[in-house]
Amino acid sequence: MRLTWRDGVSALLVGACGLIFLAVSDGWGWPLLGGYRAGAAALLVVGLAACIVGGSNMTTFDTRDAMVLGATTIGFFAFAVGIWGIVTGSETAFAILLVTTVMLWVVATIHHALEGERQHHPVAHA
């Protein structure tokens, strides 16, 4: 697949994650974002929305594709860190959650871009 409007919306949602991180860590006083626990919950929800929007046109799960497996691993790790952040209110978990969310978005976007290239240049198989 090539980059689509879904990738653009996903990018905006990941950008919103960056704003949430800054709002919480710099104490901007945004409603409902009074601490790291609330920030982790917000990052988890917005990050999950980015994954759903960005990956909603995925029709198969190819276990032979290293990028799909890598993204899946990062996604499970991000979810676990998000739960850790919600349960403990840890600043460390909050920061790791942002980093893993951005990593997941980068891997998914690169995969979408490369998948489009592979579809336009088919390789003959023996």
Image: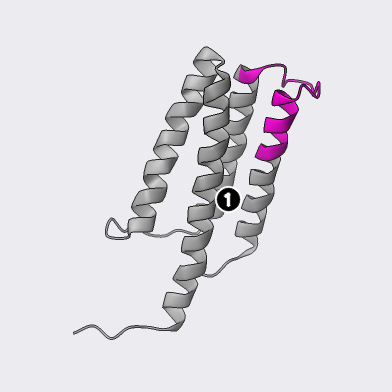
**How are the residues colored?**
one colour
Q: Could you say whether the residue bearing mark 1 is in a helix, strand or loop?
A: helix
Count up the numbered dots.
1
On the picture, is 65 further left or further right than 9? left
Is residue 21 on the magenta stretch? yes
* Residue projecting furthest to the top: 88
On the rendered image, what quadrant is the C terminus found in? bottom left
Measured along the vertical axis of the image, is residue 94 above or below residue 65?
A: above
Task: Verify whether residue 10 appears in magenta.
Answer: no
Q: Is residue 123 above or below residue 44?
A: below
Q: Dot 1: few (<14), some (14–19), or many (≥20) neighbours within 10 Å?
A: some
Residue positioned 57% across, 26% down in the render: 94
Q: Position of residue 114 (x, y in %)?
A: 47, 69
In the rendered image, which quarter is residue 4 located in?
Answer: bottom right
The residue depicted at 37 percent of the width and 83 percent of the height is: 122
Q: Nearer the viewer, residue 29 or 95?
A: 95
Tell me which segment is drawn in magenta.
17-36
Residue 48 shows in this picture: no
Name the one closer to the observer, 84 or 99: 99
Residue 6 locus on image (x, y percent): 61, 58
Specify whether residue 111 is in view: yes
Q: Label 1 sits on what residue type?
A: Val
Residue 98 screen position, x and y as percent: 58, 36
Q: Quadrant of residue 43?
A: top right
Q: Quadrant of residue 13?
A: top right
Q: What residue is shown at x 42% (from left), y 49% (from top)?
A: 71
Q: Is residue 43 above or below residue 101?
A: above
Query: How far from the left and from the top, in percent, is residue 77?
Result: 41, 35
Tell me the residue at 66%/58% (across/down).
Answer: 8
Question: Where does label 1 land, which residue?
Answer: 53
